[in-house]
């Protein structure tokens, strides 16, 4: 039987891969990106985990600081819709991070394989994610890089991952260099594309609107052949977002969430309430809609079957969708900052270099997260354990210095 396309796909470990790290046995690869590799791991007690390891070639001062920041953020936030922090060691020779393993596709892959969600399921997804993001904001944080690939559709419902770009909303300084814009262009709000700092809660409202638009239609607010044109569209106040193919009942909500001015966007609690209203107008309770969403998107709900997908209103593609991107728990790559010289044909959704804006020039950005797909090859069980001894964990003096600086910085900014 062919592998279930809605499940997390794994590939076998390569000879150079470790087989154990920090007490987690590594079972297979589930994704990789510019900064490192993501593995399916298992704790000594049998708890599955997604384990990120940073490549030796990129373990420099900045990479350690950013990776340590993601770890500290994950320690700060919690909730049923956030992939939980399990363990980490940012000071190891090869820094690593273990988080909750979610056995399901990301939203982008799901839409690519299965088609669009109905309006009531989009509203349920919106209420769920808006409530989760509101909890993140209560901790004084903004995600800053919400996108379909950072929403995992597991057997217990959607979960948000990848807080590598999250920043404290009231922080006067961040780890981002001056005149540098970071994020994913396809879901980036105008103020983020313009380099406005500090970024505040409306950034995540806009990004959530872009995610819901993608769930309902398979496209983003703005699309272009290259990243230069895309940024021009995002930052041009006269250019309205593309809401073509959006179900009529979702248009008011998405229009307000994708407003150019941050102050014109609804708050996250208001998003939750508007989504509830849309759900109840369909004769359902929020709990019923949540169960329908999970039943529709959970891996077990979609056994592979030959032939085309059934087409129902707003649930099946009406145009060609982008190639499948089989990534579930992406690494947080942070490439070196470079001048704004993206290739003319760069894909706005997958282009990864950091793009640095110069004074009095058009702003640029980079896709700070995003990974290449893992080939569909389900990990066989039972497995043969490889008799390799775990490599010793070493800590450099520079790593200890970075960790101490980060702890001091967070202690000064924390409200508790």
Image: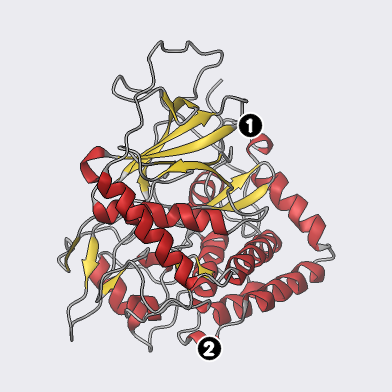
Q: Vertically, is 204 above or below 325?
A: below
Mark 2 sits on what residue? 263
Horizontal side, residue 277 vs residue 373: left or right: right
Q: Vertically, is 153 above or below 24?
A: below
Horizontal side, residue 132 vs residue 361: left or right: right
Position of the C terminus, as image quadrant, is bottom right
Q: How is the image coloured?
A: secondary structure
Question: Residue 201 at what x, y percent from top left?
Answer: 53, 76
Position of the N terminus, as image quadrant, is top right
Horizontal side, residue 167 vs residue 265: left or right: left
Whether residue 318 appears in this view of the structure is no
Judging depth in this view, the residue of 43 and 2 nearest the camera is: 43
Q: CA distance from mark 1 to mark 2?
A: 44 Å
Classify 10 Å Cα crowding around label 1: few (below 14), some (14-19), many (20 and above): few
Residue depicted at 27% across the width and 64% down the height: 225
Question: Residue 138 at what x, y percent from top left?
Answer: 62, 71
Mark 1 sits on what residue? 303
């Amino acid at each position: 039987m062919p592998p279930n396309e809605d499940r997390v796909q794994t590939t076998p470990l390569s000879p150079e891969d470790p087989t154990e790290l920090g007490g987690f046995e590594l079972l297979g690869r589930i994704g990789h990106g510019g900064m490192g590799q993501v593995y399916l791991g298992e704790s000594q007690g049998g708890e599955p985990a997604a384990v990120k390891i940073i490549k030796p070639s990129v373990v420099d001062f900045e990479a350690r600081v950013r990776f340590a920041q993601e770890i500290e953020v994950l320690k700060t936030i919690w909730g049923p819709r956030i992939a939980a922090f399990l363990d980490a060691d940012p000071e190891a020779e090869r820094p690593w991070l273990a988080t909750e393993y979610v056995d399901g596709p990301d939203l982008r892959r799901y839409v690519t394989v299965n088609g669009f969600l109905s309006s009531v399921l989009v509203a349920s997804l919106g209420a769920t994610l808006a409530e989760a993001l509101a909890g993140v904001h209560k901790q004084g944080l903004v995600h800053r890089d919400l996108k379909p690939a950072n929403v995992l559709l597991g057997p217990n419902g959607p979960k948000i991952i990848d807080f590598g770009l999250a920043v404290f909303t009231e922080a006067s300084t961040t780890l981002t260099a001056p005149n540098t814009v970071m994020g994913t262009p396809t879901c980036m709000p105008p103020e983020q594309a313009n380099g406005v700092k500090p970024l505040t809660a409306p950034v995540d409202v806009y990004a959530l609107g872009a995610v819901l638009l993608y769930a309902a239609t398979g496209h983003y607010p703005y699309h272009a052949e290259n990243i230069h044109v895309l940024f021009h569209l995002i930052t041009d106040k006269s250019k309205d977002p593309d809401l073509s193919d959006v179900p009529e009942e979702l248009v008011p909500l998405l229009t307000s969430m994708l407003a150019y001015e941050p102050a014109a966007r609804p708050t996250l609690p208001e998003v939750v309430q508007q989504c509830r209203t849309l759900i109840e107008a369909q004769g359902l309770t929020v709990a019923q809609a949540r169960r329908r969403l999970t039943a529709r998107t959970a891996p077990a709900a979609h056994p592979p079957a030959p032939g085309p997908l059934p087409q129902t209103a707003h649930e099946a593609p009406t145009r060609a969708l982008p190639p499948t991107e089989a990534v579930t728990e992406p690494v947080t790559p942070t490439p070196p900052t470079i001048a704004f010289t993206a290739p003319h044909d760069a894909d706005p959704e997958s282009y990864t270099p950091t793009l640095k804006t110069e004074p009095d020039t058009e702003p640029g950005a980079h896709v700070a997260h995003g990974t290449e797909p893992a080939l569909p090859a389900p990990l066989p069980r039972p497995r043969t354990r490889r008799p390799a001894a775990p490599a010793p964990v070493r800590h450099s003096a520079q790593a200890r210095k970075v960790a101490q600086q980060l702890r001091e910085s967070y202690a000064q900014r924390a409200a508790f």
